[in-house]
Amino acid sequence: MENNVNNPKRMISILEDNGKVSFKLEGKFIAEDVILICNTVILSAMNQLLKNYTETLQGAAKAPVNPEVLNKQIAELKGMLYDFYNVNAANLLATFAPEFEKNPDLTTQAILKAENELIEEKYEELKAEGKVVPLKTVPKAKKIDIEQE
């Protein structure tokens, strides 16, 4: 498909209604543009989540927030978002094109289990050193059904 540079009127619509998602392209797109645009939206959403979380932590504190504690909590959320996106990207690719799976013996679940074990080991180390600051809330993933038009 050719990128239509002369007609810049293009739109990507995403509608979520009770857990069902519809996705619609209006105008001419090349595949790379759609993927880059969607990934840019995801990156923007992740950065907005970090910003909102930082503002919430600072706003909820009754005293000035220790920058070291704040940075640790932000890093923890950033790590959780990273892992969540990493697993979901792998699942998306496995769903879209399972025939391209390069390591069928290394399932997403096995990788996630190994990552969680490493995280738990590091957490126990930090806890033993008294460097753990628990998060009050943990984001939860939910399944979203996709309808294609």
Image (spheres, rainbow, N blue to C red):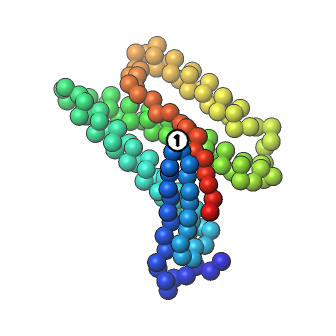
Figure disc tally: 1
Can you say whether 29 is above or below 69 in the image?
Answer: below
Q: Looking at the picture, how far across and down is residue 78, in whole percent?
A: 45, 39
In the displayed structure image, the side of residue 39 where residue 94 appears, left or right: right
Q: Looking at the picture, how far across and down is residue 8, in whole percent?
A: 47, 79
Closest to the observer: 148 or 50? 148
Instruction: Please report the residue visible at 71 percent of the width from the left and 53 percent of the height from the top.
Output: 96
- Quadrant (top left/top right/bottom left/bottom right) for the C terminus: bottom right
Can you say whether 147 is above or below 52 in the image?
Answer: below
Can you say whether 95 is above or below 137 in the image?
Answer: below
Instruction: Please report the residue visible at 62 percent of the width from the left and 41 percent of the height from the top.
Output: 87
Closest to the observer: 73 or 13? 13
Q: Looking at the picture, how far across and down is residue 31, in whole percent?
A: 62, 68
Crowding near the residue tagged with mark 1, few <14, some 14–19, many ≥20 C-alpha atoms within 10 Å = few
User: Which residue is labeled 1 in the image?
Assistant: 82
- Name, please, the residue furthest toward the bottom: 6
The answer to whether residue 86 of the structure is visible from this angle is no
Name the residue type under label 1: Tyr
The answer to whether residue 15 of the structure is visible from this angle is yes
Instruction: Please report the residue visible at 48 percent of the width from the left and 70 percent of the height from the top.
Output: 11
- Quadrant (top left/top right/bottom left/bottom right) for the N terminus: bottom right
Closest to the observer: 100 or 130? 100
Element on which disc 1 rests: helix
Q: Looking at the picture, how far across and down is residue 88, in whole percent?
A: 61, 44
- Name, please, the residue furthest toward the top: 128
- Name, please, the residue furthest toward the left: 63
Instruction: Please report the residue visible at 38 percent of the width from the left and 25 percent of the height from the top.
Output: 136
Q: Quadrant of residue 135?
A: top left
